[in-house]
Amino acid sequence: MKIDIHVHTKKTKQGDATTREIDAKRFHEIISSTEVKIVGITNHNVFDFTQYEEFVGEVGEDFQIWPGVELDILEDGRRGHLILIVSPEHAKILEDTIVKITEDSDPDSFNISIDDVISYFDKLKPLYIAHYKNKKPDLLDKDVERIFAKTTNKNRVLKEATNAVSAGIFISHGHASIYGSDVQNWEKYQSFHSKNLPDLRLPVESFEQFCLLLDKDQMAIDTLLDKKQPEKIRIKPFKDDAWLELIVYDDINIFFGAKGTGKSEILTAIGSYYANKGIGCRKFEAGTVRLEDTYDLSGKKIQVDLKDHNIDYCNKEIEIIKNAHEVSITSLPRYRQFYSESLKNQKTKRIKIKDFVTVNTQKFEREFENVLNTNIKVKEFKSYIDKSPIIKEVLSEDKIDTLASILKEAIEGLEEKSFEKFLEGKAAFLFNGIIEKFKKEVSRKTGTPTKPSGIGFHEYAANRMKIEIAATTILENIGKKSR
């Protein structure tokens, strides 16, 4: 889920673009079409509680809206911007406070000191998000440090960057950082602004929960991690055959350890564990030697034609082995997760294509392969007949012509048949792709899990058989002796 802590819904200052204006229905429509699930409304020096309630009523439970404001800060004659976001429970108090402190000014002329911000707003336990560095007009380090020193909620002080790269640099230097769209034109939000927003790896359900994560509250973290369906696995990564128990989450898992502590062995053991369960798994190691650089895998140095020795090059089989990977079997938790959650967006329920059953493309692949191989054999036979002098001795010219005509007709029919099977296979592949694409987009835009396409055991078994057949063919040809 994505979060946008900096959006504008009103033109409040003379410098604001009119394209920042948006009504509740269009706001709901635009945000719902993206992966954004949390939005902070932060207009300049204004918080419109009536508009906020209207937006919340229109949106319902499709995504969260957090109330906020972007304040003009004046410190030592310098101007900067500071975003405040509070709990939805404090939305009315936020408006009342802003109305009180701006009663003698307008949004263009209003400014406030950091000390006054803390005095008026700190009791609401807000997020303080300061424009920083290239995010102009910015607050200096000493300004941010002053906020940090004055507030009682120190974990809620963040620095707003301009993009993910800047935020990553700030975080790597120990600065809590986040960034928002600061949308200028709502018609560009779907195609541009929403694409580059921060992703939350955990499904945050409320403002309070987000703050607990900033506090690194272990109970809140555990609660959210529990929704990731952790699995306890037992592996034997080392030569001493000792068992190692690990908790693995259905998400990104990170193992820390110095060089030589056995991380690679653990990864290998985890890969074997899931492969044995029929779940696809690949392992990549940095700095490993490329086989292509060590061995002549392409066979460029071989000067002999293996076909002269009745040995197949097995190009197709080698390609199958090189590209082999495990086909996953659908796990029961995926079914449980899908059927335990229902789609809230009524429009998505009418998209029936997402519920279609995918077609078994391997059937078409086998049929195409059979027709293709038959065609090759018939062509080889016709070529042999055309060149063989013995055939001309035992058959009359009319019979040879008849045989050649029949074989030619068979070849033409097989070529037409192979093209037909090729089209059927590609049509099935495209049909499956459309279904999966619709499923992915519905899941991405609604935040609900996709319906599993099937159990996957047939594909898993067929894939294993395909690999075994290819390996057997290669071994058979390796074992052949040259003449």
Image: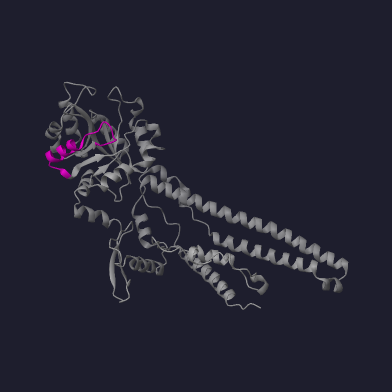
- In the rendered image, residue 391, in percent from the top left (x then y), is placed at 82, 72
- In the rendered image, residue 160, in percent from the top left (x then y), is placed at 26, 39
Locate residue 113 relative to residue 400 in the image: left or right.
Answer: left
Whether residue 32 is situated above or below residue 415 in the rendered picture:
above
Instruction: Report the front residue among 253 and 159.
Output: 159
> For residue 148: magenta?
yes
Location of residue 52 (image quadrant): top left
Q: Is residue 37 visible?
A: no
The residue drawn where x is 58% and y is 60% is: 364
The residue drawn where x is 79% and y is 63% is: 406
The residue drawn where x is 84% and y is 64% is: 401
The residue drawn where x is 19% and y is 55% is: 219
Locate residue 49 relative to residue 32 in the image: left or right.
Answer: left
Please state the extent of the stretch shown in magenta in the rendering. Answer: 131-154
What is the quadrant of the C terminus in the image? bottom right
- In the rendered image, residue 255, in percent from the top left (x then y), is placed at 29, 61
> For residue 206: magenta?
no
